[in-house]
Amino acid sequence: MESAIHCSNLKKSYGSFTLDINDLHIATGTVHGLIGANGCGKTTTIKLLLGLLFPDSGDLSVLGSHAIGQDTEIRQNIGFIVEDASVPSLMNAKQLSDVLKQTYHGWDQGRFDLLLKQFQLDAKKQYRMYSRGMKVKLQLAVALSHQASLLILDEPTSGLDPLARDEIITILSEFREDESHTILISSHITSDLEKLCDYVTFLEHGRIRFTREKDELLDEFRLVQTTHQMEADIDSDAIVARRDGSFQVELLMRAQDVPSFVEARRLNLEELIILLSRKGGAA
Amino acid sequence: MALLLKDVFLIRKRNLIMLFAIAIFVVLAGVQGGLVNTVMATMMPLLMGFTTLAYDQNDGWEAYACALPFSRIQIVKSKYVLALISIVVSILLVLIVGLAASVLELKTMLSNAVTQFTFGSLFVAINYPLILKFGFEKSRLYYILVMIGLMSIGSALSTFQKGPSMPVSLAFALPVAALAGLIASYFLSCSIMKNKEFSGS
């Protein structure tokens, strides 16, 4: 599959933190989630992809460009939301669109106005007067109004109420219907990513633990809840991760390894990531 | 153009008091002349441009603009263009008021225009790279020191001046030197901006 984003041997250090990505490939037409705890390198990765940080070494390509920091033409095709970068607080949406229509070749004023209406955003209200959710929605409206083929979104649903999060997920789901559209979205709210993503990459301490197709990953594992006595009958090599409780134990196992004498259930992405984090091994 | 338009929107927002102060200094510079009035007639509009830099950095617009389809050179250029427009407009306004009032000699008015251009250009030339490099908040002290330093130099020069207007050699040398400083500053700012990273908090 064609790559919308490709990183190889990418390194970036500052302070005591080092991001070290051996290989990250995000295929065109997919939704790819970056998962990980705070400080694991999600925002650093996204800032590198937007040219806001420069790699110490390695190669990255975004929509075919290997120098995204200098490539203004390629940036015409990228919509983004990123931490610490925002629109001027004293401007309103109307003024912002006046600026952006002179910035983006493909600016679609009708689409922008429609999104403002859909998001119930007052175009004449200053950005600083918006709530956190409204600010994200305005930035998303910008990202979706210039015919971008790639969205790079850093924690777009963080700090939002469930209703606003659902609204944003719905809009992004509509965007992905076009097969030429790609989304890279980072979040520590794994339930949002579970609804949206085709692939997930799990980052931990600046390194990729794994990149997997989401459904395949969820199909692969089962959660077994059993007693400590019954656990003795289970092959210990088949246990991928465990969580001990007072009366029972939760075991993460591959579906094919689950013995018939115990009950097992499918996990959601959040449960799986938490258990895999405890284990420390690759999925 | 888009970046200049953004700055115009910001300047328009909350600068009525500033506009009033500019009007006062422009009238005083045009009618009375004098180093302080003349310099302030240019500094005040420049300060309005400087506030857009402060807003840009506080709001995260500087990083946002770098991810938009603008080159970093365009971002720097827009700030210098805005500063030059501010200087030229302030010179023209003082000249217009001076000609209308007909109190000062033409030679004095031209001498004041040279002072405006020189001080304005040097103020921008020294401060913009500092603000880009260290941020508006950290540069605040330098920024005040530069203003005081320039005023002191101007004041010292004016004491050697015999009449109300400056010698012809100085009238040519000062703007040329200031322009050279401005050009050097622009390239320095471009270099700072090209290497700037936005790692955030």
Image (cartoon, coloured by chain):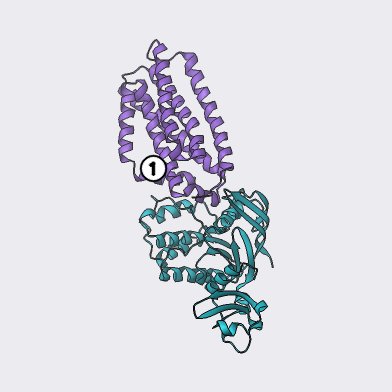
Q: Looking at the picture, how far across and down is residue A77, in whole percent?
A: 58, 58
Instruction: Find chain B in the image and tell me its colour.
Output: purple
Q: Quadrant of residue B32?
A: top left
Q: In which quarter of the image is residue A272?
A: bottom right
Residue A92 relative to residue A14: left or right: left
- Residue at horizontal 56%, vertical 34%? B188
Q: Give the quarter of the figure containing the C terminus of chain A.
A: bottom right
Q: Mark 1 points at which residue?
A: B11
Instruction: Find chain A in the image and tell me its colour.
Output: cyan
Q: Give the quarter of the figure containing the N terminus of chain A.
A: bottom right
Compared with residue B22, is residue A193 higher up or lower down, i.e. above or below? Answer: below
Compared with residue A140, is residue B173 higher up or lower down, i.e. above or below? Answer: above
> Helix, strand or loop at disc 1?
helix
Residue A24 relative to residue A227: left or right: right
Total labels drawn? 1
Of all residues, the one furthest to the bottom in this rendering is A261
- Residue at horizontal 37%, vertical 14%? B164
Q: Residue B95: tell me if it is visible.
A: no
Of all residues, the one furthest to the top in this rendering is B162
Residue type at numbered disc 1: Ile
Q: Looking at the picture, how far across and down is residue B156, in whole percent?
A: 41, 16
> Which chain does the numbered disc 1 sit on?
B
Q: Looking at the picture, how far across and down is residue A231, in whole percent?
A: 59, 82
Q: In which quarter of the image is residue B195?
A: top right
Residue A178 relative to residue B170: left or right: right
Compared with residue B26, is residue A246 higher up or lower down, i.e. above or below? Answer: below
Q: Residue A79: tell me if it is visible.
A: yes
